Image: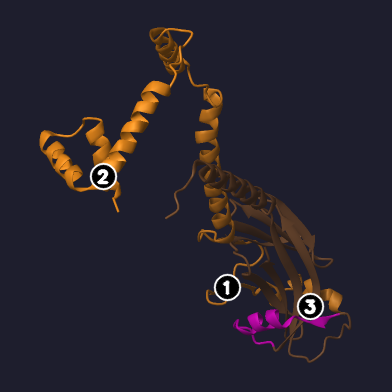
Amino acid sequence: MKPITLFAFRRWWRCLWLAGLLVSVGTLLAADFKFEAQLIWATNDQKSPNPKHKPVEAEVRKKLSDLPLKWKNYFEVNRKTMELARGGSQKVALSEKCTLEIKDVDGGRVEVSLVGKREPVLKRTQPLPKDEILVLGGNAPNATAWLVTLKRTE
Amino acid sequence: MMDWEQQLKLQAYLDDELSAADRRRVEAWLARDSEAVALLAELRRTHMALAVGERDHQLPESREFYWSQIERGIRSAERTPTAPERSSWWAAWRRLVIPLGAMAAVVLAGILTVSQFNPAPGRESEMTLADSDAFTYRDYAGGMTLVWLSYPAESESSLSSLVDTLD
């Protein structure tokens, strides 16, 4: 077996130090969380009366179909992305009367606040790992429903 | 043909380095081998030529002085301290702090990465401010949480207005 020389040992330590530094810097730079929020209209109609609405993505549709919801079609009304620093908060308006606010709690949980017509409707704190989705929903006129989905993308 | 060992034996005989028994054996060998006698005569002539023809070289210094110089040189070389590679605190810094710092950085990065991408299951809390009949459905396999608010359907100030931009 080839003996480890002092030079090789020092080079190994140097590489380890550099790798540690790069990983640390990369981790700190990537410390922000990213979320995607969507306002969705659920209906049994085949088409939305608003031509600006488009069917939700297949992945979202699949996820929603796995939930105990009775509607067949889901249309995306609005979509917003949010970046959240550790301990920070972010607020987005999904419609004129619907505002969603998220806040990082101890780096592992997220506090979600839903405001409708300037009234706080729901405040919920839960872990939201990457790719998991929180769905807030309620009934709407004509046997339809509104949904607000919040997905952590990073 | 005489081999190397026999030639050395003759050289030792000439230099009077053999034991009595060996000496007798060599003399018996010389009595019956003319080639050995010839080689011995050649060695003897060479020995004589070196003894007579080699000139003595007289050193300018005496033998004692010459060796005292060598001895002094050896002692001074032993006393000369070896130069340190670097200052001691710098060497300690490089040997200990940098590797430990690197390891600490790697461990810290690992902890941050694990905590960020695999957060520990934390407590969930919920406060429905405008709806006391909300229920929560959790799909662990699908990574979905559904919070359903029944409030809008029965009230004029319903959340259905959230999607009033539909019209």
Which one is in front, B69 or B103?
B69
Amino acid under disc 1: Gly
x%, y% of residue A147?
71, 75
What is the C-alpha distance between the residues marked 2 and 3? 118 Å
Q: Secondary structure at mark 1?
A: loop
The residue positioned 44% from the left and 49% from the top of the image is: A3
x%, y% of residue B91?
53, 29
What label does residue B36 carry, if any? Answer: 2
Q: Chain letter for orange?
A: B
Q: Reply yes or no: does residue A59 show up in magenta.
A: yes
- Residue B19 appears in the picture as rendered: yes
What is the C-alpha distance between the residues marked 2 and 1? 105 Å
2 vs 1, front mark? 2
Q: Reply yes or no: does residue B73 show up in magenta.
A: no
Which one is in front, B93 or B134?
B93
Q: Are marks 2 and 3 in contact (CB under 8 Å)?
A: no
Which colouring convention does the figure follow?
A: by chain
The residue positioned 15% from the left and 37% from the top of the image is: B23
Quadrant of the image occupied by residue B46: top left
**Horizontally, is A154 left or right of B87 in the view?**
right
Instruction: Please give the range of residues in magenta.
Output: A53-71
3 vs 1, front mark? 1
Query: What residue is shown with label 3?
Result: A76
What label does residue B143 carry, if any? Answer: 1
Amino acid under disc 3: Glu
Vertical placement of residue A97 versus B76, above or below: below
Residues packed near mark 1 inside 10 Å, few (<14), some (14 to 19) or many (20 plus): some
| Chain A drawn colour | brown
